[in-house]
Image (cartoon, rainbow, N blue to C red):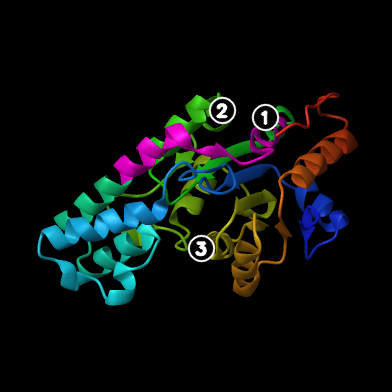
Amino acid sequence: MWPGMLDDKTERLHGLIGSVRFVLFDFDGPLCRLFAGRSAEGVAKAQVRWLESRGLRGLLTADLREDPDPFVVLRAVDRRLPGSDLSAELEAMLTRHEVSAVASAWPTPYADPLIRTWTAVGARLAITSNNAPEAVSRYLASRGLMDCFAPHIYGRCTRNLALLKPDPHCVRRALTAMGADPKSTLLIGDAPSDFLAARRAGVGFLGYARNDRKAGLLHDAGAGHLVSSLEPVLRAVVSAARARKSGPTEFSWGP
């Protein structure tokens, strides 16, 4: 097991957190494992079978037909037929799977208290995700977290799938809606696409990597601040709040 921090000292994390006034969370990863109770690979295979049943097997290469990521399949079809009814139907199928998966999603340890604590000390939060906003909203409601984010939930733009991260579209939407200064904004994500979107929008980035594979991908993309657990982030938020003498005096550290 790694320690809570990766490739960075605790002091640097505290420095990163101390200047933050706006926090943008990716959804699947930093907040929960959406497909923990079922297989994302199964969703990708269902997409492929759906295309094959319509005689559209040729839209995907052999490698794409075996890819376990449903976003890869969706992007591939939309690149071939951008804005088509076919890509819209495939996106709607993915949305149904995501919404259904909420019931068996696993909360990321320490995510809920981190969200509530950051809100309590005055930070403004938003979701910037490639997932369907319907799935995000349903999950947040199930955890009693909607008040921490609403109305700032910026999910998949169904009319233009080219605007998925790493395009910074959803990040810039959040910045504009909240009147946020990019220099005091932090995006927490678990994928290279999150890091690239943050960099293109000019906001800070903290990578959440729950395993070595995730850490390697983020590191290779150029992300410098990585954590393997949200616990040190929670502690840094509390420390910064106490330093400003504006936060709560008692906190729960449980996941």
Question: What is the crowding at mark 1: few (fewer than 14 residues within 10 Å), some, or many (at least 20)?
Answer: some
Quick one: SS at disc 3?
A: helix
Instruction: Return the residue nearer the eye: 212 or 25.
Output: 212
Residue type, numbered disc 2: Leu
Disc 1 + disc 3, Cβ < 8 Å: no
For disc 3, the marked residue is 193
Instruction: Return the residue nearer the eye: 37 or 142.
Output: 37
**Label 1 vs label 2: CA separation?**
8 Å
In which quadrant of the rendered view does residue 206 lie?
bottom right
Give the position of the N terminus as an image quadrant: bottom right
Question: What is the crowding at mark 2: few (fewer than 14 residues within 10 Å), some, or many (at least 20)?
Answer: some
Residue 163, position in %: x, y? 38, 59
Quick one: SS at disc 2?
A: loop
**Label 2 vs label 3: CA separation?**
25 Å
**Left or right, 53 with reference to 37:** left
Q: Give the range drawn in magenta.
A: 95-117
- 100 inside magenta stretch: yes
For disc 2, the marked residue is 145
Res. 74 visible in picture: yes
Residue 210, position in %: x, y? 64, 54
Instruction: Return the residue nearer the eye: 222 or 73.
Output: 73
For disc 1, the marked residue is 116
Tell me what residue is drawn at x 33 percent, y 75 percent.
63
Residue type, numbered disc 3: Ser
Tell me what residue is drawn at x 27 percent, y 69 percent.
79
